[in-house]
Image (cartoon, rainbow, N blue to C red):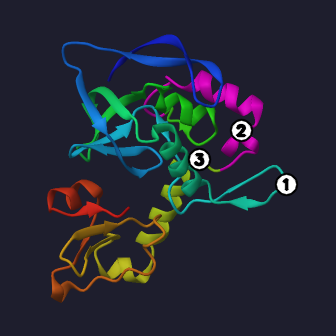
């Protein structure tokens, strides 16, 4: 994983905080260009899929609560926050590892500052402490200020995914499919897309195995078979 040191960055939100930045090494991969946003913590640059290192944003279908107990679409809001941070600028990403799905784990920046830290600072992502403590300090500051998902004690995305995954594998339909709940669908134009249990499109997606559609046990299996994740 990347080695980190502390540095100060000013973001477009006019918030100046202490964040963590990557120190390039001989093994570091650098990707730069115009980013296509896939969700709140995943982008693609020139065919390279990149997972923002050290953070975990709410899933697209996830909802959170504000201080008054009202629900809001935090998953969609996280994607929009990432869109605002990038805003058509060139994105430069550096990382020295890949996840199980082949995505580059990277710290990404624009001319305005670091993206990973900004998402946590603004309350649109958690520090992904299972894999890194790089953004724990940033999250603590955002919690103290009560920004975004940190206004109250909302469910983190890893817990949200776990519940959805468990519910899918326990369903009668999934049991008939050898407990492999990922739905591999083929669009009318022939594009192979897979749907995860926590995505908004999952419930309305059907699998027609006679038409070549199939079920998958994990994302890596789906990616190797030529399917891409639903956006």
Q: Earlier in the sequence, mark 3 or mark 1?
A: 1
Q: Which quadrant of the structure image shows residue 119?
A: top right
Q: Nearer the viewer, residue 110 or 146?
A: 110
Q: Nearer the viewer, residue 74 or 80?
A: 80
Q: Nearer the viewer, residue 146 or 86?
A: 86
Location of residue 203 in the rendering, given as x and y in whole percent from the top left corner: 46, 78
Q: Which quadrant of the structure image shows residue 135?
A: top right
Q: Which mark is residue 139?
A: none
Q: Nearer the viewer, residue 201 or 83?
A: 83
Residue at 18% x, 76% y: name it.
Answer: 190
Residue range highlighted in magenta: 130-154
Residue at 33% x, 20% y: name it.
Answer: 2
**145 part of magenta stretch:** yes
Against 170, is 132 above or below? above
Number of numbered discs present? 3
Q: Earlier in the sequence, mark 2 or mark 3?
A: 2
Location of residue 171 in the rendering, given as x and y in whole percent from the top left corner: 45, 78
Against 160, is 189 above or below? below
Q: Which quadrant of the structure image shows residue 108?
A: top left
Location of residue 144 in the rendering, given as x and y in whole percent from the top left corner: 76, 29
Residue highlighted by disc 1: 68
Q: Which mark is residue 156?
A: 3
**141 part of magenta stretch:** yes
- Image position of 126 (left or right of 213): right
Quadrant containing the C terminus is bottom left
Q: Are marks 2 and 3 in contact (CB under 8 Å)?
A: no
Q: Considering the numbered disc 1 on the image, is that residue within a helix, a strand or a loop?
A: loop
Task: Please state which of the two labelled residues, at mark 3 or mark 1, is closer to the viewer.
Answer: 1
Against 9, is 178 above or below? below
Label 3 – label 1 distance at C-alpha: 19 Å
């Amino acid at each position: 994983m990347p080695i980190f040191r502390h540095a100060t960055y000013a973001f477009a939100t006019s918030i100046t905080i202490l964040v963590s930045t990557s120190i390039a090494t001989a093994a570091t991969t650098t990707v730069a260009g115009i980013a296509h946003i896939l969700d709140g913590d995943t982008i693609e640059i020139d065919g390279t899929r990149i997972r923002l290192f050290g953070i975990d944003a709410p899933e697209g279908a996830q909802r959170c609560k504000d201080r008054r107990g009202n629900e809001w679409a935090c998953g969609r809001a996280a994607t929009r926050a990432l869109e605002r941070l990038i805003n058509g600028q060139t994105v430069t990403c550096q990382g020295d590892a890949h996840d199980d799905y082949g995505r580059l784990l990277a710290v990404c920046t624009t001319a305005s500052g670091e993206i990973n830290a900004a998402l946590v600072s603004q309350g649109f992502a958690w520090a992904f402490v299972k894999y890194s403590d790089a953004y724990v300090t940033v999250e603590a500051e955002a919690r103290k200020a009560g920004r975004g998902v940190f206004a109250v004690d909302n469910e983190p995305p890893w817990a949200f995914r776990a519940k959805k995954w468990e519910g899918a594998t326990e369903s009668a339909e999934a049991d008939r499919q050898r407990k492999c709940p990922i739905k591999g669908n083929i669009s009318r134009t022939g594009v192979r897309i897979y749907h995860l249990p926590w995505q908004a499109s999952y419930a309305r997606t059907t699998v027609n195995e006679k038409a070549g559609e199939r079920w998958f046990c994990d994302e890596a299996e789906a990616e190797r078979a030529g399917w891409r994740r639903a956006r």
